[in-house]
Image (spheres, helix red, strand yellow):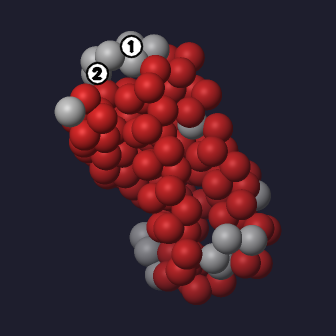
């Protein structure tokens, strides 16, 4: 496992963590994440020879930390730009920040599965 590579490939996720707080709307966020997943999958197929799925999964775990931390720490700014999402979280069983702390890792795991599959698929396509 190349944790250093995973960390560096999570840097676009750190950018997205901050960008989603301030200027990327929820409606187009998935397009940005898809581009990041494809980029990371491609880079993994260039840099490693095995364990593509696991490396992709770990990158998304790093991303989960970045996004959850940015959204919780910068909550007031996040709430200013994402009022609809914050209103939905207010109807939950806990504060919006607590909801983010719970849902962030779940989304991180689910996106890790997607990132892992994309990394694995790109490695198979490139090895042909």
Residue 40 vs 74, above or below: the answer is above
* Quarter holding residue 86: bottom right
Residue 111: give x, y in percent of width and height: 37, 51
Instruction: Look at the numbered disc 1 and give the secondary structure of its residue.
Output: loop
> Closer to the camera, 122 or 97?
122
- Is 44 left or right of 10, judged from the image as shown? left
Q: Earlier in the sequence, mark 2 or mark 1?
A: 1
- Is 71 left or right of 33, judged from the image as shown? right
> Closer to the camera, 95 or 32?
32
> Which mark, residue 38?
none
Rendered residue at 38%/35% (across/down): 56
Residue 114 vs 119, above or below: the answer is below
Q: Are there few (<14), some (14-19), or many (20+) residues within 10 Å of tag 2?
A: some
Q: Are there few (<14), some (14-19), or many (20+) residues within 10 Å of tag 1?
A: few
Instruction: Look at the numbered disc 2 and give the secondary structure of its residue.
Output: loop
Rendered residue at 45%/14% (across/down): 2
To which residue does mark 2 refer?
A: 51
Residue 37 vs 89, above or below: the answer is above
Q: How many marks?
A: 2
Q: From where the camera sits, is residue 94 visible?
A: no
Residue 59: give x, y in percent of width and height: 46, 34
> For the view shown, which residue lies furthest in the front direction?
128
* Quarter holding residue 1: top left
Residue 66: give x, y in percent of width and height: 61, 43
Rendered residue at 67%/71% (across/down): 24
The C terminus lies in quadrant? top left
To which residue does mark 1 refer?
A: 1
Rendered residue at 55%/62% (across/down): 32
The span from disc 2 to disc 1 (Cα, nearest Å) is 7 Å
Disc 2 vs disc 1: Cβ atoms closer than 8 Å?
A: yes
Residue 45 vs 92, above or below: the answer is above
Q: From where the camera sits, is residue 55 visible?
A: yes
């Amino acid at each position: 496992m190349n944790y250093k590579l995973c960390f560096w490939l999570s840097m676009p996720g750190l950018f997205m963590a901050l960008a989603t707080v301030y200027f990327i709307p929820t409606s187009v966020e998935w397009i940005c994440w898809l581009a990041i997943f494809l980029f990371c999958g491609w880079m993994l197929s260039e840099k490693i020879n095995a364990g593509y799925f696991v490396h992709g999964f770990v990158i998304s775990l790093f991303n989960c930390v970045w996004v959850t931390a940015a959204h919780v720490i910068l909550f007031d700014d996040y709430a200013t730009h994402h009022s609809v999402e914050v209103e939905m979280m207010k109807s939950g069983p806990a504060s919006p920040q607590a909801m983010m702390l719970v849902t962030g890792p779940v989304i991180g795991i689910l996106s890790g599965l997607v990132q892992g599959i994309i990394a694995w698929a790109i490695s198979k396509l490139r090895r042909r």
